[in-house]
Structure formats: C-alpha cells, structure tokens
Image: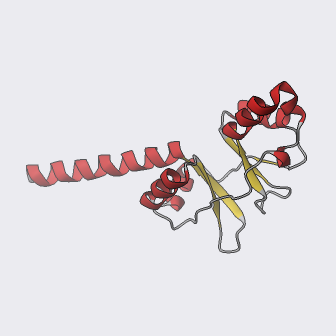
Amino acid sequence: MNVQSIIGGKGSEVATIPQTATLRDAVRALGERRIGALVVSGDGRAIEGIVSERDIVRAAAALGESSLDRSVGSVMSTDVITCAAGDGVDRLMSLMTERRIRHLPVVDERGHLTGIVSIGDVVKARLAELEHENHALAEYISGR
C-alpha cells in the first residue's frame, strides 16, 4: 500500500492556515476539524511550515496564555518533512519514527501540496495490509 491509496480512501483535503493567523485561530481550527496539525500555507499549495498541537503546547508552556495571541509563523516548524504519492507505508513508518513526527504533507513533483497523511492513517493502512496477508495465508493453508 502506498500514499496514493491512503489518500484515495480518505480524501486529499488539507487544512491550511496562513502564517499571520494567531495560535488562537489555529487552536480553533484544530478543534473544529478534530485534527492534530495544520499545514502553514498562504495559497494552499506552497508549504511554508506546519503547526501541530505539540507546537502550540510548547508555546503555551513557555509563554503562558498570551501565547495564543502570537502568530502561527512564530511557532511553526519550518523543516517540513514531506512524502510523495508513490511512497510506501514502510517508508512513512520509518520517516515518522525516525523524525518523531505524526503528520506528513504529500507533495507532487513540483513540491505542491496534494494531501496529508497522519500516523493514524499509516497505522490503519498497515493493519489493512496485515489483515489481507493473514487472510491470504489462511486461504493458502486451508487449500481454498
């Protein structure tokens, strides 16, 4: 299974937010959409950064409640690790584990944003692969 099949099942919509938005705006968007990260982009295609729940919690711990009035651009991660539609689940798991990240924006050959996968998406895809393999082995063993 690869990124393209994951996106095909969940959809390619990506929640974005501009750098100038406040963390309060980001918290509201994360809560309303029930997601863990927003891609920071002014046009919905170019990736400027990513802001996650973790980034917001760290800002709140360092600055207190006033952190919610800061801009997304002041706390976003700018070293955004991305993936491509053809990348396999094993590569995603490796990237997410090694880099300790939970969200990977998906980009096309021009680097434009085309989707996003979360650790939950990857785990779900891997479980589906294992279930399929288990079923195939059971069929083989039983001679069906």
The residue sitting at 68% across, 36% down in the picture is 53
Asked if residue 20 lies left or right of residue 143, the reply is: right
The residue sitting at 71% across, 61% down in the picture is 113
| Colour scheme in use | secondary structure
Image quadrant occupied by the N terminus? bottom left
Residue 85 in the image: state x and y as whole percent: 56, 65
Asked if residue 80 lies left or right of residue 140, the reply is: right
Establish if 99 lies above or below 51.
below
Which residue is situated farthest in the bottom direction here? 109
Which residue is situated farthest in the top direction here? 65
The answer to whether residue 72 of the structure is visible from this angle is yes
Establish if 72 lies above or below 34.
below
- The part of the image, by quadrant, that contains residue 44 is bottom right
Which residue is situated farthest in the front direction here? 62
- Which one is in front, 95 or 11? 95
- Which one is in front, 80 or 87? 80
Residue 21 in the image: state x and y as whole percent: 88, 43
- Which one is in front, 75 or 132? 75
Residue 132 in the image: state x and y as whole percent: 30, 50
The answer to whether residue 144 of the structure is visible from this angle is no
Q: Total number of numbered labels?
A: 0
The residue sitting at 27% across, 52% down in the picture is 133
Residue 64 in the image: state x and y as whole percent: 81, 26
- Which one is in front, 63 or 32? 63
The residue sitting at 37% across, 45% down in the picture is 127
